[in-house]
Amino acid sequence: MQRYKPGIVKLLALSVVLAMGAAACGSDDEPEATGGGTATTPGGEPLAAATLNGSGATFPKGFYDEVIAEFQAENPSVTVNYPGGGSGKGRQDLADGLVDFAGTDGLVKEEDKPKYKGGEFLYVPTVVAPITVSYNLSGVDELTLDAETIAKIFQRQITTWDDAAIKALNPSATLPATEITVARRADSSGTSENFTKYLAAAAPGTFTIAAGSQPSWPDGTQAGQGNAGVAQIVKDTGGAIGYVDLSDAKASGLKLASVKNKAGKAVKPTAAAASAAAAGATVNPDLTYNPLNAEGDASYPITAPTWIIVYQTQTDKAKGEALKSFLDFLLTEGQDLAEEIDYAPLPDTLATKAIAQVDKITLPA
């Protein structure tokens, strides 16, 4: 079954519709053609009944929920479950053979790869999106921060909103002496990993916490479960600040800081700014890449990648066919859903590579 990158899919569908219409006009005796979006196996048969279980990153969960709903509507024989749980949980669940796929915003460590019971796995990039620096500060609707200042805030070196460093970046704002409450992730998180990697890259002389999925944050911070949990702390706490994916931040009605990028431009966290960051990233042969602290005036500097990881060799034919069809759907029709819910679709060149990656998945006879 040949697959096509986003943008081409709609053109192909239109061509099919026009061709069907022409055929119908040419012969009144032929039955009227019907169509649908139901996926089929490589042999052309409808997908067999299957349940796919996943777990992992909450950062892309809003996007995955939309894609799953659309995919299941077109393929009622397949059920896809994705409760989230954090990137660390997803990777561990896949390693232990508890799920069929895992969502992750971070990479598997080399020393952990032999622990994966299903053997070699593949990275399938899905979308990109900003990690926002969200805040709750009455009377301050516009805020600009840079990497140095963010690093000091999250290390509890800057503890009040009227600190001189914040004032220097926001000379027109009336900043109160309110104490800053830092909200961060409690669980093993790809969002934490990418946020700390950004600070380590953009403020290397200031940020001294080791980057990772479970950073050693200082005392006095508040921990939330998942991106939604951090968003809730910020929403409920005057003076709070936290790092949250754009979709959850907007759903919670949070204020979003502009962040100075590598070019010195203050950029708001938007899907377009995330696309600008991803467009210039170097993609490795295994389809891992890093859009953090990217070059370019329009790039939002805390732009995170995310992947679904799957075993290359599948042992259940029905599940394997359903999994490949689901991933194909996500990388084609699914990409059109991304911006509606504050994610950025993959650049076309990367989407094409991702579709080719899915083709590497092998099924039993």
Image: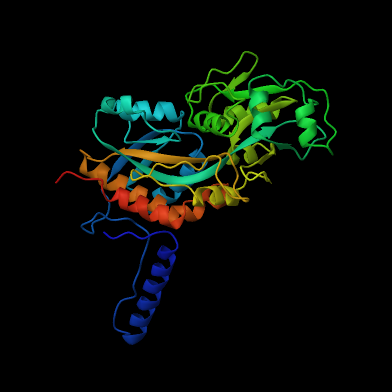
Q: Is residue 173 above or below residue 49?
A: above
Q: Residue at left 62%, top 25%?
A: 206
Residue 76 visible in the displayed image: no
Q: Residue at left 36%, top 48%?
A: 327
For the view shown, which residue lies furthest in the top direction? 219
Q: Residue at left 53%, top 49%?
A: 344
Q: Is residue 96 above or below residue 255?
A: above
Image quadrant assignment for residue 148 = top right
| Residue 16 in the figure: left or right of residue 257 | left
| Residue 104 in the figure: left or right of residue 257 | left
Which image quarter is the N terminus in? bottom left
Residue 179 visible in the displayed image: yes
Q: Position of residue 249 (x, y in %)?
A: 63, 37
Asked whether 148 or 291 is in front, the reply is 148
Q: Position of residue 155 (x, y in %)?
A: 63, 20
Q: Residue at left 58%, top 27%?
A: 229
Asked whether 203 or 249 is in front, the reply is 203
Disc count in the image? 0
> How is the protein colored in the picture?
rainbow
Q: Position of residue 217 (x, y in %)?
A: 57, 18
For the view shown, which residue lies furthest in the left direction? 365
Q: Is residue 352 above or below residue 132?
A: below
| Residue 133 in the figure: left or right of residue 325 | right
Asked whether 365 or 155 is in front, the reply is 155
Q: Position of residue 102 (x, y in %)?
A: 37, 35
For the view shown, which residue lies furthest in the front direction? 205
Asked whether 199 or 337 is in front, the reply is 199
